[in-house]
Image: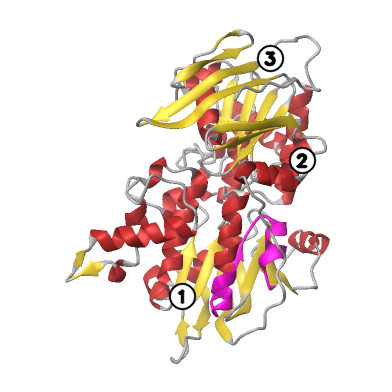
């Protein structure tokens, strides 16, 4: 399908599209993943590129930024043939991309990552003073004045790393910027800073392709929306006046009830009692009770201690003090203290964790979907001490169907899946584990609206079966829709706890900005 569009924000000094894709197609292993994509992008325009996971958004983006090449078709940049041989080649020509999977080097500082490729030097030595000054300027663009440029990236939370990655790409020669799910790990405050920067880039004539599943933010910033489905361009239209429900239907080919509010669930008995849990300044004297059949949402700004809290509950990090009292069915209460808690004891006690960083902490990327889902579930796929491959494949096939994981089958390597489908594989592992207490850290990050609906259904089903769930999310709409209670973290403390019917978005935000 061939579609072109014109921008209301076109630069006055040029009528040529800054970027033009003509009949772009892409095949992997004789499987067609993109077919005949034709688009034109003009200066100062924000194009929202949307579609389900696996629809082809990331493939289009990677072709534009030189990470992969098209099987057929052509690209033009400023009217000239554009065939980037690599990401660095594309960046040299002013085309940059912020990937879902961050490209920062964790052993280097924030400043060194920001200026990578053009580090200032004097007589062959790194000029640290100039490096720091330029890094501060880049950080200020993203509203990150409080972030120390000398901090190692490995010491930052995933949300802060996302902000640094975006800041790294705001270079002077920028002509086209691709943002792939840039707010997936950001809170409203950080997202607002990003949107302000996008407005400034538009005013300077930078063309932006904005890939996101958060349709409400597309309506705020996009001039035009292009919808992909199964590798085909099915619609391109001005964003003004487009309804969210219409976009969803074009994306998935059916109506989807997304973020339906839940009726208040009856509160069950206590499943987990957290008592004065602390770790340095990251988590400070946090106490709360989690009940069977309850979804407890955890909100807060990036760096507030949300992720650190769930990692302590799971034993992934070691607490300085505090206790966990786990109330197991028909068994004595299990009290866990910091001197011996670890992920193994947590799993044995009935806890599971879906991490926010699926690539480094949640998946074995070279391994198959079947291997990844069966991790932690070996008892269900073994016979006589050996893995029964048929059982493993059947197990994976069950969850591929249940969560609508877009793949070629259970044997496909997880590394070849889209980010959202990788997240569903992590989720499937813990759903199969059948934990009594499930800790979810950004469980729908990078997941499209159709798949999100499937995940919400699974979460609600678990709650109805008496499971206790802690759910961390940067998306307040999501938390307000699915939670029974919402706790708000600020500066390492649990500063507020709201019941359903008591909260408003304003109240949650005010609590998040509390100086604990």
> Which numbered disc, 3 or 2, marks the residue that appears first in the sequence?
3
Q: Identify the magenta region.
A: 460-484
What is the residue that sits farthest to the left in this orientation?
Answer: 384
Where's the N terminus, which quadrant?
top right
Label 3: few (<14), some (14–19) or many (≥20) C-alpha neighbours in 10 Å: many
> Which numbered disc, 2 or 1, marks the residue that appears first in the sequence?
2
Secondary element at tag 1: loop
Structural distance between the alpha carbons of marks 2 and 1: 46 Å
Q: Is residue 174 magenta?
A: no
Expressed as whole percent of the image width and height from the top left, the position of residue 359 reads: 44, 48
Expressed as whole percent of the image width and height from the top left, the position of residue 420 reads: 52, 48
Give residue 194's quadrant in the image. Answer: top right
Residue under label 3: 17
> Which numbered disc, 1 or 3, marks the residue that appears first in the sequence?
3
Q: Nearer the viewer, residue 223 or 204?
A: 223
Viewer can see residue 117: no
Mark 1 and 3 residues: CB-CB less than 8 Å, in contact? no
Residue under label 1: 338
Residue under label 2: 219
Label 1: few (<14), some (14–19) or many (≥20) C-alpha neighbours in 10 Å: many
Structural distance between the alpha carbons of marks 3 and 2: 23 Å
Give residue 177's quadrant in the image. Answer: top right
Mark 2 and 1 residues: CB-CB less than 8 Å, in contact? no
Secondary element at tag 2: helix
């Amino acid at each position: 399908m061939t579609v072109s569009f014109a921008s209301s924000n076109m630069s006055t000094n040029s009528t040529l599209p800054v970027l033009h894709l003509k009949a772009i197609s892409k095949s992997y292993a004789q499987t067609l993943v993109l077919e005949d994509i034709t688009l034109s992008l003009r200066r100062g325009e924000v194009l929202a590129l949307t579609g389900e996971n696996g629809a082809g958004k990331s493939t289009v983006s990677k072709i534009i930024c030189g990470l992969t090449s098209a099987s057929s078709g052509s690209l033009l940049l400023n009217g000239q043939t554009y065939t980037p041989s690599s990401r660095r080649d594309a960046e040299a020509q002013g085309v940059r991309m912020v990937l879902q999977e961050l490209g920062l080097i964790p052993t280097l500082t924030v400043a060194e990552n920001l200026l990578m490729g053009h580090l200032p030097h004097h007589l062959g030595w790194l000029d640290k003073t100039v490096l720091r000054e330029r890094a501060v300027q880049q950080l200020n663009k993203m509203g990150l004045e409080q972030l120390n440029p000398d901090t190692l990236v490995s010491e930052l939370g995933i949300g802060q790393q996302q902000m640094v990655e975006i800041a790294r790409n705001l270079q002077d020669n920028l002509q086209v910027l691709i943002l792939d799910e840039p707010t997936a790990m950001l809170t409203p405050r950080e997202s607002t800073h990003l949107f302000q920067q996008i407005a400034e880039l538009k005013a300077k004539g930078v063309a932006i392709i904005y890939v996101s599943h958060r349709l409400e933010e597309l309506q705020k910033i996009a001039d035009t929306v292009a919808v992909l489905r199964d590798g085909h361009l099915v619609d391109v239209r001005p964003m003004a006046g487009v309804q969210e429900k219409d976009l969803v239907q074009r994306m998935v080919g059916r109506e989807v009830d997304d973020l339906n509010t839940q009726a208040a669930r009856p509160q069950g008995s206590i499943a987990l009692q957290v008592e004065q849990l602390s770790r340095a300044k990251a988590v400070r004297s946090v106490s709360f009770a989690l009940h069977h059949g309850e979804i407890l949402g955890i909100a807060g700004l990036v760096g507030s201690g949300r992720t650190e809290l769930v990692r302590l509950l799971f034993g992934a990090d070691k607490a300085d003090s505090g206790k966990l009292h786990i109330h197991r069915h028909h068994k004595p209460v299990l009290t866990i203290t910091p001197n011996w808690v670890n992920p193994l004891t947590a799993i044995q006690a009935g806890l599971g964790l879906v991490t926010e960083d699926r690539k480094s902490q949640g998946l074995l990327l070279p391994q198959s979907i079947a291997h990844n889902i069966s991790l932690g579930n070996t008892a269900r796929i073994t016979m006589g001490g050996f893995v029964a491959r048929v059982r493993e494949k059947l197990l994976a096939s069950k969850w591929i169907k249940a969560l609508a994981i877009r793949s070629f089958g259970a044997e496909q390597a997880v590394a070849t899946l889209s980010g959202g489908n990788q997240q569903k594989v992590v989720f499937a592992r813990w759903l199969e584990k059948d934990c009594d207490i499930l800790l979810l850290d950004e469980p729908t990050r990078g997941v499209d609206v159709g798949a999100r609906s499937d995940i919400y259904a699974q979460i609600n089903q678990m709650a109805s079966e008496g499971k206790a769930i802690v759910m961390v999310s940067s998306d307040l709409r999501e938390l307000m829709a699915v939670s029974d209670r919402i706790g708000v973290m600020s500066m390492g403390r649990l500063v507020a706890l709201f019941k359903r019917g008591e909260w408003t978005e304003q109240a949650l935000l005010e609590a998040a900005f509390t100086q604990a």
